[in-house]
Image (tube, grey):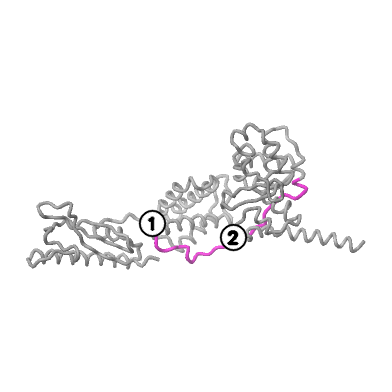
Amino acid sequence: MNTNILSVRFFVKKYKVKENLVPVYVRISVDGRSADASLKREIELTTWNPDKGQATGTRNEIKSFNAYLDQVRTDISNCYAELKFQRKPINAQVVKNAFCGVAAEEHTLVGLIEYHNTHLKNTLEWGTMKNYITTQKYIQKFLKDIKKTSDIPLSQLSYSFLVDFEIFLKAHKPKDHHLPCGHNTTLKHIERLKKMINLAIRNEWMERDPFAKFQARFIRNDREFLSQEELQTIEAKEFKILRLQWAKDLFVFSCYTGLAYCDVMSLTKENISIGIDGEYWIMTSRKKTNQPVRVPLLPKALEIIEKYKGHPKAITTGTVSSTLTNQKLNGYLKEIADFCGITKNLTFHLARHTFATTVTLTNGVPMETVSKMLGHTNIRTTQIYAKVIEKKVSDDMKSLKQKLVS
């Protein structure tokens, strides 16, 4: 935390000397960072004492000039004290602006969001960036409909602002095709706002964190996944429509590798290597977290790699399979679900859940191993799938009961 230590020093610029007169400046420093301001005054170079930061001599004009410097020091100290009293973020430039009578250009919430979305658009995945844009729209609507303004200074963000925004999100009923925000969706929007606020704090655009006392907990929902029978139904279905067959193969590949959409699309032949057991492994890292991922290739996943290794589009892009946008892929999966009689919301991410549950945990693979293959940064994330272990315990006990009866 900054201690906001102020220092004031006067100096002249000798290289601007003209007829033995040099301009006088003040250097305002706060926590080691400084800002210079011209005093619009000149002094004789021969009378200036750089060590003392003032003129030397007994003439009345010298005494008057030094008294002026003392007043400047007092004025700057008063500006600094007033800023501190107002609990405003303080740095050298802010104190200089206050002394010079320049209105500080305060950062605003809308300006922060635009800064975030502009500066980070090349480092975030499009899906993540799209979510931030949705959050931006909700914030703008909240400001317009509830706060009756188009923007708000960051210094005015408070705990009550966050509570009001949460209430707005939960009560808002979209007039288009979008669904109202549930509890977890609401908290996702607030979580994105928090990340942007943290960016502002790191940039020293605001001093107080409005999230300091704000607490909210996500409701843990059971992750949907395909049962063994549903997965086998999709595997057995062959499509004459190439785009559906292609989408099915990509989905099944993810069911047997646990890779997320962006990791499947960026997978190259260089990511397929011989592991310590002499078998083929996927060796890559998750785009979302940059965590390393090491997954032994199961036979069905290897079959799909072999099937597409000579595909013209795969050769052109250098990937294991030709790429397809997530939106189109999920659209094709909806058609596949209809053809296969599956009523679950079939999305590509459902394949990752299916790998974690039906393919691995249900078949006795330890949770620690599954967590590592999924590239989770925390095993608690993997424990969301613990329900399937309970199902396996139930099935195993049923088998035991049958054996004991017979």
Q: Main secondary structure of the magenta part?
A: loop
Q: Is residue 219 magenta?
A: yes
Amino acid on which the number 1 mark rests in the picture:
Pro
The one of 156 and 226 positioned closer to us in this rendering: 226
Q: Residue at the location (67% across, 36% down)?
A: 309
Q: Is residue 130 magenta?
A: no
Dot 2: what SS? Answer: loop
- Compared with 240, 80 (above or below) is below
As measured in the structure, the alpha-carbon distance from the residue carrying label 2 to the one carrying label 1 is 29 Å
Residue to which mark 1 is pinned: 153
Left or right of 93 in this view: 64: left
Locate residue 82 relative to residue 383 in the image: left or right.
left
Q: What residue is at 55 percent from the left and 51 percent from the top?
A: 173
Segment tinted magenta in the rendering: 205-231
Badge number at residue 218 = 2
Quadrant, the N terminus: bottom left
Drawn side of residue 95 relative to residue 53, left or right:
right
Residue neighbourhood size for the residue with mark 1, other residues' Cα within 10 Å, grouped as few (<14), some (14–19), many (≥20): some
Quadrant housing residue 88: bottom left
Helix, strand or loop at label 1? It is: loop
Q: Residue furthest right?
A: 406
Precedes in sequence: disc 2 or disc 1:
1
Rendered position, 375 above or below 341: below
Where does the image place residue 24, in percent across and percent down from the top left?
18, 58
- The x, y position of residue 73, in whole percent, is 22, 65
Relative to the observer, which residue lies in front, 173 or 209?
A: 209
Could you say which is closer to the camera, residue 72 or residue 140? 72
